[in-house]
């Protein structure tokens, strides 16, 4: 039995991703927190324990059990916390009402080369009149600097969950029949495909709009990070995050 007035302690697992992992100098730790505590308090204590994370300011993102955490989210013993900078192209996350996905929708992460045509054909069904497919690939030049290759990494369970949410939201926002997203991780050479988004719909306008929306939201909310490797160094590509 604990002494009167003492606080109990909870034990959590903390994962660091992208530039936050480099700053913390660790990929995964076990961490003790006083109980009760919430996401805001846990975040503050992690930053105190790893002061190098302070450089991210308020843009540092926080997840609990593979979901973006609201500030007052209660932290419990055994929870999995994740700390990461904004994903490669975006600025945090937002809640959007969900709708049911189609049985033909698919959301995948792979280390293998992606066959763009094969992905596109998976959403082509008789009731659809148009399919729009985005092929995102590694470019050689960024702001006048030559890229040798890219490295993508993902918080995979959460990334797949967020992709599925995008699918649900796409069905709620647009008159589409099916949507598929496949993202590659690991090392990519210049010209290799990193992500394919394919959307089918009865009419082409909805397919175009949904595909454009999906890539924008994917870069904003799905926890996948990109490192650009140059001849003279490397850098993690971070989104805008929240204002520091």
Image: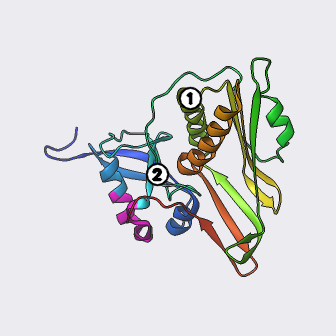
Position of 191 relative to 79 (above/below): below
Scheme by which the image is coloured: rainbow
Label pair 2/1, CB-CB below 8 angstroms: no
Write down the residue under mark 1.
Answer: 168
Look at the numbered disc 1 and give the secondary structure of its residue. Answer: helix
Q: Where is residue 177 in the image (x, y as percent from the top left)?
A: 67, 24
Residue 230 numbered tag? none
Which residue appears at 53% of the width and 55% of the height?
Answer: 90
Magenta range: 44-58
Mark 2 or mark 1, earlier in chain: 2
Give the residue pinned by disc 2: 92
Q: Are there few (<14), some (14-19), or many (20+) residues within 10 Å of tag 2? A: many
Instruction: Give the Cα separation between the discs numbered 2 and 1.
Output: 19 Å
Query: Where, quadrant-wise, is the C terminus in this rendering?
Result: bottom left
Observer-nearest of 25 and 215: 215
| Image quadrant containing the N terminus | top left
Q: Is residue 61 above or below residue 150?
A: above
């Amino acid at each position: 039995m604990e002494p009167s007035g003492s606080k109990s302690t909870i034990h959590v697992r903390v994962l660091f991703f992208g530039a936050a992992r480099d700053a913390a100098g660790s990929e995964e730790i076990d961490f003790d927190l006083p109980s009760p505590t919430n996401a805001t308090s846990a975040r503050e204590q992690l930053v105190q324990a790893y002061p190098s994370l302070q450089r991210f300011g308020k843009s540092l993102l926080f997840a609990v059990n593979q979901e973006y955490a609201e500030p007052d989210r209660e932290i419990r013993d055994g929870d999995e916390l994740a700390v990461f900078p904004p994903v490669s192209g975006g600025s945090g996350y937002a809640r959007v009402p969900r709708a049911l996905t189609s049985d033909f929708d698919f959301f995948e992460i792979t280390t293998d080369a992606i066959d763009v045509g094969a992905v596109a054909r998976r959403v082509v069904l008789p009731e659809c009149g148009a399919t729009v497919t985005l092929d995102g690939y590694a470019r050689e030049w960024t702001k006048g600097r030559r890229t040798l290759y890219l490295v993508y990494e993902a918080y995979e369970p959460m990334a797949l969950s967020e992709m599925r949410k995008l699918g649900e939201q796409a069905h709620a926002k647009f008159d589409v029949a099916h949507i598929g997203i496949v993202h590659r991780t690991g090392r990519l050479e210049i010209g290799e495909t990193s992500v394919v988004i394919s959307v089918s719909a009865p009419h082409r306008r909805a397919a175009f709009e949904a595909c454009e929306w999906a890539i924008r939201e994917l870069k904003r909310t799905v926890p996948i990070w990109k490192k650009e490797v140059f001849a003279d160094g490397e850098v993690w590509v971070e989104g805008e995050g929240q204002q520091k």
